[in-house]
Image (spheres, rainbow, N blue to C red):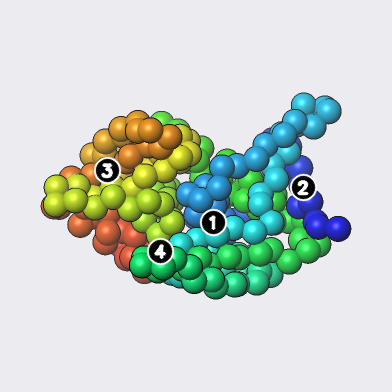
């Protein structure tokens, strides 16, 4: 029997188990997952949301799969990595990561990482917020864009750097993340997807520099 990987999130009164470095890693992993899989949420009888991440996820880029594997390894989540090649004239690769059984904390980690990270980014500026808090929000913003550029549908033209996504919430997070990195972004709905783009030039260069591991603002999960 396959594992269900169901796990209830902690209540609002329960202290969060993720420190800032762990939050950034969990948030980026959740963003990578949302780039390729719509989240599955069901309701418990008592009304609490229960999130079920997929047992396996496929990326069409090896670096995206390796990044996801690296992030999950920080939480001692064991995964297997399978590579498949297909196509005739146009060859393509698929990289499938499968979570090993009996790891119930996997679901809770992704849920908490996404909820807290999204809340930090979409919440308004806090009066008197410290420089450290602003830096950490910028790190979350960079993590969201790094995930999207690795696993989203890259849409690069001479005048824009963009990504196509099917997840509306992630698209909104990217727009806000760009603003936190001092880059204006545009969100355009398309057929079955959303295109988030920034203009080529100083803005796109700032995004690319911020998403490099170890870039400024200093990374804490590289």
Q: Which mark is residue 29?
A: 1
Tag 2 residue: 6
Tag 3 residue: 197
Tag 4 residue: 219
Q: Is 46 rendered above or below residue 119?
A: above
What x and y, as percent, mark residue 100?
Answer: 73, 66
Q: Earlier in the sequence, mark 4 or mark 3?
A: 3
| Crowdedness near tag 3: few (<14), some (14–19) or many (≥20) residues, C-alpha within 10 Å | many
Q: Are marks 1 and 4 in contact (CB under 8 Å)?
A: no
Where disc 3 sits, the SS reads: strand
Where disc 1 sits, the SS reads: helix
Q: Earlier in the sequence, mark 3 or mark 2?
A: 2
| Crowdedness near tag 4: few (<14), some (14–19) or many (≥20) residues, C-alpha within 10 Å | many
Residue 65 horizontal side relative to residue 181, left or right: right
What x and y, as percent, mark residue 96?
Answer: 58, 65
Mark 1–mark 2 distance (CA, rounded to whole Å): 17 Å
Residue 76 horizontal side relative to residue 139, left or right: right
Image depth: mark 4 or mark 3 in front: 3
| Crowdedness near tag 1: few (<14), some (14–19) or many (≥20) residues, C-alpha within 10 Å | many
Image depth: mark 1 or mark 4 in front: 1
Q: Earlier in the sequence, mark 1 or mark 2?
A: 2
Where disc 4 sits, the SS reads: loop
- Asked if one can make out residue 42 in the rendered structure from this viewpoint, the answer is yes
* The N terminus - image quarter: bottom right
Where disc 2 sits, the SS reads: loop
Mark 1–mark 4 distance (CA, rounded to whole Å): 15 Å
Q: Residue at x 65, y 72 (%)?
A: 80
């Amino acid at each position: 029997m396959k594992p269900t990987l169901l796990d209830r999130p902690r209540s609002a009164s329960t202290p969060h188990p993720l420190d800032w470095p762990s939050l950034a890693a969990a948030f980026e992993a959740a963003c990578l997952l949302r780039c390729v899989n719509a989240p599955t949420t069901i309701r418990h009888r008592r009304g609490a949301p229960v999130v079920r991440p997929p047992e396996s996820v496929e990326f069409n880029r090896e670096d995206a799969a390796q990044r996801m594997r690296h992030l999950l390894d920080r939480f001692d989540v064991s995964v297997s990595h399978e590579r498949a090649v297909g196509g005739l004239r146009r060859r393509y690769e698929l990289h499938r990561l499968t979570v090993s059984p009996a790891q119930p904390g996997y679901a809770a980690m992704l849920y908490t990482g996404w909820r807290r990270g999204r809340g930090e980014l979409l919440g308004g500026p806090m009066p008197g917020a410290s420089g450290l808090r602003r830096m950490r929000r910028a790190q979350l913003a960079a993590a969201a864009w790094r995930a999207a550029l690795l696993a989203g549908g890259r849409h690069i033209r001479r005048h824009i750097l963009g990504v196509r996504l099917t997840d509306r919430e992630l698209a909104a997070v990217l727009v806000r993340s760009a603003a936190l990195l001092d880059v204006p972004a545009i969100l355009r709905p398309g057929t079955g997807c959303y295109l988030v783009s920034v203009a080529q030039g100083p803005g796109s260069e700032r995004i690319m520099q911020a998403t490099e591991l170890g870039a400024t603002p200093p990374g804490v999960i590289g």
